Amino acid sequence: MSYLVVFLFVYAVFELAEIWLKYLNYQYVSCQDRQKSCQKVLGISEDNLQKSYAYFKDHYYFSLLKKSLYLVCFILFYALGGLTLFEQIALSLSSYVNGAEMVTGIIFFAFTAVVTTILGLPLDYYATFVLEQKHGFNKYTTRLFCTDILKSTVISLVLSSVFYGLFMFLISMGGFWWLTTWILASLFLFLSCLIQPLINHWFYKFAPIDRDGDDQALYDGLVDMAKRVNFQLSKILKINGSKRSTHGNAYFTGFFKQKRVVLYDTLMEKLNHDELLAVVAHELGHYKLGHLKFRVMQATAVSFVVFAGLSLIAARPELAQDFGFSGATLYTTTFFFFLFFNKIIVRFLQPLFSFLSRHDEFAADRFAASLSPAKDLVAGLLKLREMNQTMPLTHPLVSWLYASHPPVIERITVLESIGDEGKA
Ligand SMILES: [Zn+2]
């Protein structure tokens, strides 16, 4: 059996398993008794929960359609020689430059990314202007939607071209190339955390919160809270998330002496000062407990083993032939490396990282409860849930495999058991 058939079979099994899990979660969340008891525990009105359920249901059907379409298109593309065609296009385009293998590779990856983005546009458009619109979340104009796509495509093309170019260069140097490419990938991961705030500035407007007006109490409260845990806070910013959607969020950004709190304007509108302080205390918890640092370190450590393993497979000439390439090249090795990484390996790693992430969420909640009253975080989480119309339930298996955050009902149950340990 060819490598291509084995790969497509494994890929399809994973995709079908995910579709089945989505169905399982849908059945679990749709259970009337479960919804009723959840409503009681969280004190949510029937009407409110039904709104969230309608949003969840529309998302469920949309994700089924999207997953099935992608699965069929992916298999057809590979089975009907799509890679041969893409390689031919890259080869003919690179012949205008100098025809070097690395140039062909960069064009091949850029072309694939652009085609994938264009083909995904109708679904992205539907998700924004039909699905999100129907539930009252969308604030995008068509113009802003197009500008955002153009900007993110440009950023990802520039960054990925640099990355793939260096990756192929390191493979061409031979020797322990899995080790040098692993160092490169780790550096990129670190750099991407560093430049993320700069990228965000290209999309959103940031403004310092009004320290002399309505938000003075909030400002003083945040500064005081940061001082209590010895956290050097350089700025407290408000982001104009409402230009795109009514969903709300808060996060920390920056390193060293440039640490900032960023609050969505949508969140500031809905949450009172105490609830905002509690939400920020949770984010502060992630920072103080070193979650981001550990996450980067964990990813780097795991990828060390993965890179060593994948380097044994990705360069095989018979693999390139089976998939329809003209032969084994620098770009086919790079291609197989990331194809197997993204489509197969990641699925094995996801439960581990989801588990660690959920563990961090509980830890950050406990940290927040030690800084501000737990009831404020409970109230904040409930408002955040309502703002984002999140169903507070998730099937335990689905949560275990994929969820980065525990279901709201679990977080609130734990917070209520902690009680008010706050010093505020
Ligand atoms: Zn969190």
Image: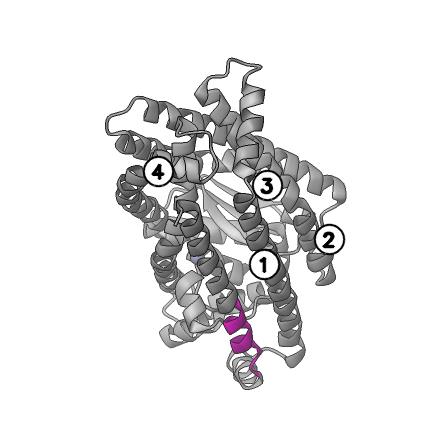
- The reply to whether the C-beta atoms of the residues labelled 1 and 3 are less than 8 Å apart is no
Mark 4: which amino acid? Answer: Ala
Residue placed under numbered mark 3 in the picture: 116
Using the numbered discs, state the Cα–Cα distance from disc 3 to disc 4 in whole angstroms.
22 Å
Q: Which residues are magenta?
A: 22-31
- 1 or 2: tag closer to the N-terminus: 1
Of the residues under marks 3 and 2, which one precedes in the sequence?
3
Which circle marks residue 129 in the picture? Answer: 2
Q: Is residue 122 magenta-colored?
A: no
Please report whichever mark, 4 or 1, sits nearer to the chain's N-terminal start: 1
Distance CA(mark 4)–CA(mark 2): 40 Å
Q: Nearer the viewer, mark 1 or mark 2?
A: 1
Q: Earlier in the sequence, mark 1 or mark 3?
A: 1
For marks 4 and 1, give the CA distance: 27 Å
Given residues 93 and 119, the one toward you in this image is 93
The amino acid on which the numbered mark 2 sits, given as a three-letter code, is: Phe
Q: Which residue is mark 1?
A: 68
Residue that carries the numbered disc 4 in the rendered image: 314
Does residue 209 show up? no
Let me know if residue 238 appears in the view: yes
Secondary structure under tag 3 reads helix
Q: Is residue 23 left or right of residue 319?
A: right
Q: Residue 163: percent from the left, percent from the top?
A: 43, 29
Left or right: residue 348 compared with residue 381: left
Alpha carbons under labels 3 and 2: distance apart: 20 Å
Please say whether residue 28 is one of the residues in the magenta stretch: yes
Secondary structure of residue under mark 1: helix
Residue 44 placed where, x, y %? 59, 77
* CB within 8 Å, label 3 to label 2: no
